[in-house]
Image: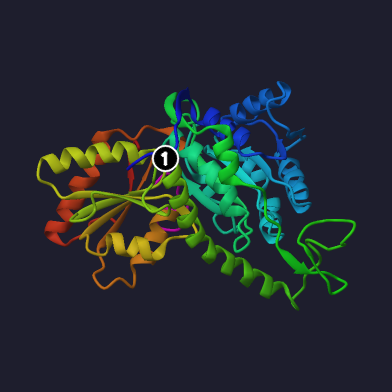
Amino acid sequence: MEITQEQKAFALNGDEAIALAIKQSDVDVVAAYPITPQTIIVEKFSEYVADGEVDTEFVCTESEHSALTACLAASATGVRTFTASASAGLALMHEILYVTAGCRAPVVMAVTNRALSAPINIHCDHSDSMVERDSSWIQIYVENSQEAYDSIIQAFRVAEHPDVLLPVMVCLDAFFLSHTLENVQVLPDETVQKFVGERSIPLVTGHEGKNVPFKLDPANPLTIGPLDLYDYYFEHKRQQEEAMQMAASTIVQVHDEYGQLSGRRYGNGLVDAYRLEDADIATVCVGSTAGTTKSVVDTLRAKGVKAGLLRLRTFRPLPIAEIRNSLETVEAVAVMDRSNSFGGNGGPIYHEIRHALFDAQARPHVVNYIYGLGGRDMPQSIIRNIYTDLQEIRETGQVNSYVQFAGVRE
């Protein structure tokens, strides 16, 4: 694919790549509280502020709850806002995650996925963001630092689209991505600023019956986030669902425009299918594990095994049609979850994939592997064993165990 814009390569870790993307995206307010392993993002950005490289109000708050509250309040005035968090910090934000989405505030947040305690653990799994899957935040999971950079830039366009107006979290794996150097192709500042553009404020009917911008403005008073009892609450929740459905096509559109600009695409923006065209067996995952899995798929293909991979780039909105179209001709599917729904018979992604495939005309066997909790490695040997299990399921038509733990000491 022809790259339409000249770019420069920098050696960046995932956190630094996100900080640079924020610097280029003309953000008005950044409010944050440090927590490992996202701290580098706001530390690096604070350097940009101190050095006068950005015209951004940087707010150091006393907690993550306050950080998101500050972003929500700023966003309600019509400005562009960003924050970052992880693990217990994201959990402390829980209340305000729902408030932010309910107020239709297009805040963008980077989540450096880290395990929730106890026991205390600072390494990667997806338990923190999976807890928030029903909060009406769009969730994008990236495979590498390049995608982290690209996705943050796209996230502002998606969140602020008048048909969407929902907050977006871009999730990257702690340490595997956040602290590991990669070559990252970076667009010029002016190119990113032009792509992101200025935030567009839609018009709504105000208290006086006039069409006014949907923001807090003394000249045109509005109430945002009011008491909303059973007379209207239900309708507003339905509107959030409609916005989430609209978000899917917006993500695809913005992803396509960015692909034309940068020469980089991640599937269609919702799912990234790898060697699935004629696959008999396949795995499904999110995040950095996809890179390792692709190598295993290539090795198996060289041996004549028709293996494939489906990486979910967006978990919310869940791309039902794309999942079904990608997997319904596969005979056996293994869903790999880096989190667990305790007592729920498998991980959250497993539940969603089975749900998506339930009405498929040719429904494959679907099994689940919980792996990598607390940052435990997922080496190629374990992934190969999963594909071996899938081959046996395909050949025998029998599943011995639908949910297993991969790489754990029993």
Residue 343 visible in rendering: no
Q: Nearer the viewer, residue 87 or 160?
A: 160
Element under disc 1: loop
The residue wearing badge 1 is: 4
x and y percentages locating residue 157 in the rendered image: 58, 51
Q: Is residue 106 left or right of residue 408?
A: right
- The structure residue drawn at horizontal position 73% and vertical position 65%, both measured from the top left corner, is 203
Query: Is residue 339 highlighted in magenta?
Result: yes
x and y percentages locating residue 175 in the rendered image: 48, 29
- The structure residue drawn at horizontal position 30% and vertical position 71%, both measured from the top left corner, is 360
x and y percentages locating residue 188 in the rendered image: 53, 32
Q: Is residue 107 left or right of residue 16?
A: right
In the picture shown, does residue 194 fall above or below 208?
above
Query: Tag 1: Cα neighbours inside 10 Å, few (<14), some, or many (≥20)?
Result: few
Q: Nearer the viewer, residue 204 or 169?
A: 204
Query: Is residue 126 highlighted in magenta?
Result: no
Residue 186 visible in rendering: yes
Q: Nearer the viewer, residue 54 or 274?
A: 54
Q: Is residue 403 left or right of residue 94?
A: left
Residue type at tag 1: Thr
